[in-house]
C-alpha cells in the first residue's frame, strides 16, 4: 500500500501502459482518475479498479481544465499526475509526414504536458507537494529512422521533465519521466508500420533482454517514482527498455 491516501490522475489510462499504471496505483491504495479520450475504455478500467473515469482530450486546454476541476471536486487534492497519453505518426520519411499529423503528435505528446502543468502545478504548489511523471520513450534518447517527429516529441518531453524538476523542486514537487521501449500496446503496430513475425523479430533483436515491455513493467517503475520511496529523486528519465539504449 505504498500510495495509501494518495490521489492520482493517469492520462491515456484506457489501455496499454496507462491502464497498467492505473491498475497498480489502485492496488497500492491510491484513488485514481482514469482520463482518456476514449470514454468507454476509461469507464471499463475505472469500473474494474474502483476509480473515476474522465473523458479528456489532453491537447485542449478546456478539456484538461475540466479534468483537473473534476479531480479537485472529487478529492480536494491531486498528489500524482501521470502524463501518459501519447500518439505517433506512421513510419515514413520525415518530409512526407503531413502538417496535420505533425501538429497532432506535438499537441498530444508535448502540448499536453504544458496544459496539465498550467492547471495542476498551481494546485501542487499550493499543497507544497506532488509527483509528476511524464511517459516519454527510448525514441527520445536513441531515435529510430522514419519516426523523426515522434522521436522529437519524446525528446521534448525529456527536456521538459528536467526543466520542470528544477523549477518545481523548491515547492516540494518532484518531476520524473520513464522511457519505455515499444510494448504490447495499441501503438505497437504504428511504430512498426506493419505487424508481422519478421518485423517483430527484427525489432526484438534491438532489445538485449529479448522481449517487448509490458504495462506491468511501466507500472512498477511508475509506482517507485511516484511514491515517497523516491522522495529524493527528481529530474530523472528512467529507461525501462531491456537495455535497448545501452
Image (spheres, helix red, strand yellow):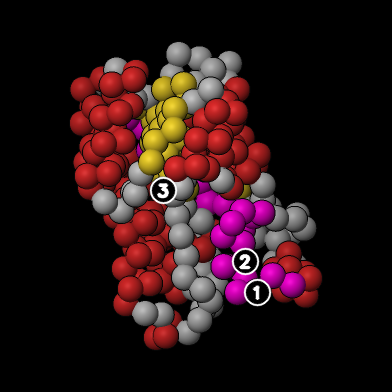
Residue 49 location in percent, x, y? 57, 26
Q: Residue at x 23, y 47 (%)?
A: 61
Q: Secondary structure at mark 1?
A: loop
Q: Nearer the viewer, mark 3 or mark 2?
A: 3
Circle 2 is placed at which residue position? 189
Rendering quarter of residue 33: top left
Secondary structure under tag 3 reads loop
Q: Which residue is under mark 1? A: 194
First in residue order: circle 2 vs circle 1: 2
Q: Secondary structure at mark 2?
A: helix
Q: Residues within 10 Å of mark 1 (few under 14, many from 20)?
A: some
Q: How dense is the environment of label 2, judged by Cα within 10 Å: few (below 14), some, or many (20 and up)?
A: some
Instruction: Tell which of 28 and 230 is nearer to you.
Output: 28
Q: Which residues are magenta?
A: 171-196
- Label 2, label 1: how many angstroms apart (C-alpha)? 6 Å
Q: Camera-side residue: 169 or 20?
A: 20
Pick whichever of labels 3 and 1 is earlier in the sequence.
3
Quadrant of the frame with the C terminus: bottom right
Mark on residue 172?
A: none
Q: Which residue is mark 3?
A: 37
Amino acid at each position: 500500500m505504498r500510495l495509501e491516501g494518495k490521489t492520482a490522475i493517469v492520462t491515456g489510462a484506457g489501455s496499454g501502459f496507462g491502464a497498467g499504471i492505473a491498475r497498480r496505483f489502485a492496488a497500492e491504495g491510491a484513488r485514481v482518475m482514469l482520463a482518456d479520450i476514449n470514454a468507454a475504455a476509461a469507464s471499463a478500467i475505472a469500473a474494474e479498479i474502483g476509480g473515476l473515469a474522465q473523458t479528456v482530450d489532453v491537447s485542449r486546454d478546456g478539456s484538461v481544465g475540466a479534468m483537473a476541476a473534476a479531480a479537485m471536486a472529487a478529492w480536494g487534492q491531486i498528489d500524482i499526475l501521470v502524463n501518459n497519453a501519447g500518439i505517433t505518426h506512421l513510419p515514413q520519411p520525415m518530409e512526407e509526414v503531413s502538417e496535420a499529423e505533425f501538429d497532432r503528435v506535438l499537441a498530444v505528446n508535448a502540448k499536453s504536458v504544458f496544459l496539465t502543468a498550467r492547471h495542476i502545478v498551481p494546485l501542487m504548489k499550493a499543497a507544497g507537494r506532488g509527483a509528476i511523471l511524464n511517459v516519454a520513450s527510448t525514441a527520445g534518447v536513441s531515435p529510430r529512422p522514419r519516426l523523426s517527429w515522434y522521436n522529437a516529441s519524446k525528446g521534448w518531453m525529456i527536456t521538459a521533465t528536467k526543466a520542470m524538476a528544477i523549477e518545481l523542486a523548491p515547492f516540494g514537487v518532484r518531476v520524473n519521466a520513464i522511457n519505455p521501449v515499444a510494448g504490447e500496446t495499441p501503438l505497437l503496430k504504428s511504430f512498426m508500420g506493419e505487424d508481422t513475425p519478421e518485423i517483430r523479430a527484427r525489432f526484438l533483436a534491438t532489445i538485449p533482454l529479448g522481449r517487448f515491455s509490458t504495462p506491468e513493467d511501466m507500472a512498477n517503475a511508475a509506482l517507485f517514482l511516484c511514491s515517497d520511496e523516491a522522495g529524493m529523486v527528481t529530474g530523472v528519465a528512467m529507461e525501462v527498455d531491456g537495455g535497448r539504449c545501452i
